[in-house]
Image (cartoon, rainbow, N blue to C red):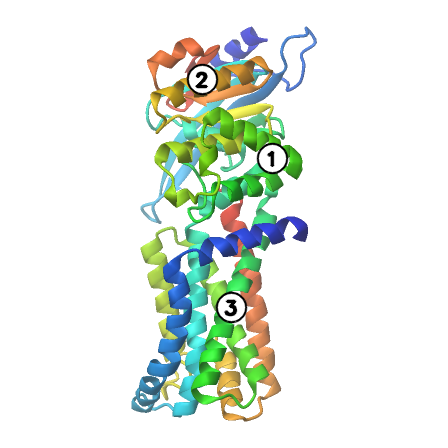
Amino acid sequence: MLSLALPTSTAFVREHLRAPLTLVLLIAIPAFFVLIFASVLGEFSKALGGTLASRSAAAISAGWATAFLCGALAFFQVSSSRGADRRLAAAGLGPLRVAVSRILAALAIGLTVSAVAFLTLWLRSGIAHPLHAFAAIFAFAATYIGIGAVIGAFVKGQLEGSLLVVLVFSVDAFSDPQMTSNGLIARTPTQDAANLLVAAGGGQGSPGGDWLGAGAIALAALAVALAAFWTSARTRG
Amino acid sequence: MAERARQGIDDGTPATVTVGRSPAGERPVVLAVRGVEKSFHRGIWPLRREIEVLKGATLEVRADELVGLVGENGSGKSTLMQIIVGLLKRNGGEIDRPARLGYCPQLPMVWEKLTVDEHFELYGRAYGIEEGERERAVVGLLEELQFAKYRGYRIEELSGGTRQKLNLALSLMHDPELLLLDEPYSGFDWETYLRFWEMSERRRDQGMGILIVSHLLAERDRLDRMYELCEGRICRC
């Protein structure tokens, strides 16, 4: 399985990284979120009745930059390559190998995006628990790989799909308990990862429940992503 | 055998044909399509409607035979091709086809950011052909279709005609037993168009079964047989 999926996933990663604008955005979005958006976010949270301090806002911004980029890239991995992936699967690679190749490519891109966001955060404000912070940022990446891939598998239009990714991202980001006192949404997909990231940035310990929650959501999201990649590569009904 | 197929089409009963060499020593049937039905669902409830595209299409292709498939726009030619390849599910009917099959879709299903060579590598692995064998096949096809100088080019840098050459080459590189061509010459200049027919006839003479979706009256002389799709059924052959 991996002997065929690995070289195919390398080609899929190359396909994404050859878009010059994608490369620019990989640097620009984490920088924008962590350096500029974070301070606005702190003020915005206070206005909404939230408790997000400026240092925490910087930390959580790194997670959201990663989430936004990974969600958008996973969506376009499915949406822009649907026909080509299905043809390759039908030629003999099979939908499962295509899906495994896609998820490996998404993980490689997710790791790269997480590393860029982590470095930006480190350079801006320092991180008390760097390993914890990286794990939390990567949990954001994994969660949004799942969200982006599943939207890509079921929404054919690129405009509609990308708008849906932005909508899910906005609801998730601005409904976080640390962002608002209005608990309309009891639980958001990145809530545990956000708690971990805020704690890691401020040097506090993280409760085991947050680790379990973030890990479970990240794994479930990756399983959903694999199913979404498989769905879009298999024979259509 | 051909007579039995015709009876099957005329009376609406699927002809009983078997893939493999017939007892009489005739050329083996490499593709047998029997009573294939396909409908699509469009719209969302309560405005959901069913569009019947294929209502029992039946045809067969033998080794060293160049068979045409014609019909009006929307008659289901491309849908039938995609069902044979395995890109679309069918609602009913049976298909016997060899595992080693080449498919050249109407629009190239390729990755814009990957190079011509990278496509050959991906498809070589999907078809399960060794590197040396792949290189020999690719060099031959590049020479035959005269686009060797574009090996290192990305698809986004190619003209429509050169993309179509790659599209055709990808379907031929594993020397399939059955070749399905869905209007493969769109974008070809006159010289390439003539070369395409020479290639097809040469492969047919070497034992390949070829089914080609065609529109042009002038091409009918080049075909050994022809099926016409009318309202989802084969109405003439």
Q: Give the SS element for disc 2.
A: helix
Q: Are marks 2 and 3 on the same chain?
A: no
Q: Which residue is mark 3?
A: A112
Residue B224: % across, % down: 48, 10
Residue A190: % across, % down: 48, 76
* Between A110 and A51, the one nearer to me in the picture: A110
Q: At label 3, which amino acid type do we have?
A: Thr
Q: Residues within 10 Å of mark 1 (few under 14, many from 20)?
A: some
How many marks can you see? 3
Q: Quadrant of residue A34?
A: bottom left
* Label number found at residue B135: 1
Of all chains, the one bearing label 1 is B
Measure how far apart labels 2 and 3 are at the Cα level.
48 Å
Q: Which residue is mark 2?
A: B197
Measure how far apart labels 3 and 1 are at the Cα level.
33 Å
Q: Are marks 3 and 1 on the same chain?
A: no
Q: Is residue A167 above or below residue A52?
A: above
Q: At label 1, which amino acid type do we have?
A: Glu
Q: Residue at x 54, y 82 (%)?
A: A133
Of all chains, the one bearing label 3 is A
Q: Residue at x 50, y 92 (%)?
A: A202
Q: Quadrant of residue B22?
A: top right
Q: Report the mark closest to the observer, 2 or 1.
A: 1
Q: Residues within 10 Å of mark 3 (few under 14, many from 20)?
A: some
Measure how far apart labels 2 and 1 are at the Cα level.
24 Å
Q: Give the SS element for disc 3.
A: helix
